[in-house]
Image (cartoon, grey):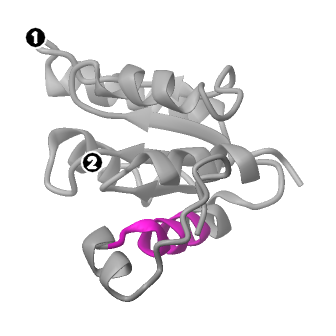
């Protein structure tokens, strides 16, 4: 199976910030940032998207906001190229995607990271109230 190429497509420098944070946990060298910077036109951004998607066949694109310009711009290519597009990216999703990019297609990887992200979103106050306070600080797991 061909390795899934991970692309971060977010507003301003958010892609780079996510990449920096993820680099503390996994090797981020192969992740591509395609940021929409202040002053970029949407036409220029869509041209960059088209070039990128032409280059890679197995691509997972992670964006910040569902209704943001990055996501909407990529959505215009969903019928043209076989890639997966996931919005609402958080650090868990990115790390999970990088860790599993060699094991799953972009479509399978999209489903996996959404599932893992949902599992990681917790109200910690409720966890403590329910007696789940056995957090191991070294391992960072319950």
Q: Residue at x 48, y 75 (%)?
A: 119
Q: Relative to 13, is 65 above or below?
A: below
- Residue 71 is marked as 2
Q: Relative to 119, is 33 above or below?
A: above
Q: CA distance from mark 1 to mark 2?
A: 18 Å
Q: Earlier in the sequence, mark 1 or mark 2?
A: 1
Q: Position of residue 40 (x, y in %)?
A: 16, 15
Q: Secondary structure at mark 2?
A: helix
- In which quadrant of the rendered image does the N terminus lie? bottom right
Disc 1 and disc 2 in contact, CB within 8 angstroms: no
Q: Position of residue 135 (x, y in %)?
A: 54, 63
Left or right of 9? Residue 39 is left
Q: Is residue 19 visible?
A: yes
Query: Which is nearer the eye, 59 or 112?
Result: 112
What residue occupies the far right of the structure in this picture?
1
- Magenta segment boundaries in residue numbering: 111-122
Give the residue number, with chain letter if any, for mark 1: 39
């Amino acid at each position: 199976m061909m390795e899934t190429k991970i692309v971060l497509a977010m507003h301003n420098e958010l892609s780079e910030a996510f990449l920096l944070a993820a680099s503390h946990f996994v090797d981020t060298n192969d992740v591509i940032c395609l940021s929409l910077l202040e002053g970029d036109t949407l036409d220029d951004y869509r041209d960059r998207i088209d070039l990128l998607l032409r280059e890679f066949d197995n691509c997972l694109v992670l964006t910040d906001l569902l209704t943001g310009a990055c996501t909407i711009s990529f959505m215009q290519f969903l019928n043209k190229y076989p890639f997966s597009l996931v919005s609402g990216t958080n650090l868990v999703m990115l790390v999970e995607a990088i860790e599993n990019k060699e094991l799953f297609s972009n479509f399978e990887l999209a489903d996996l990271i959404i599932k893992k992200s949902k599992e990681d979103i917790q109200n910690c106050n409720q966890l403590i109230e329910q007696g789940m306070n056995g957090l191991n600080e070294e391992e960072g797991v319950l």
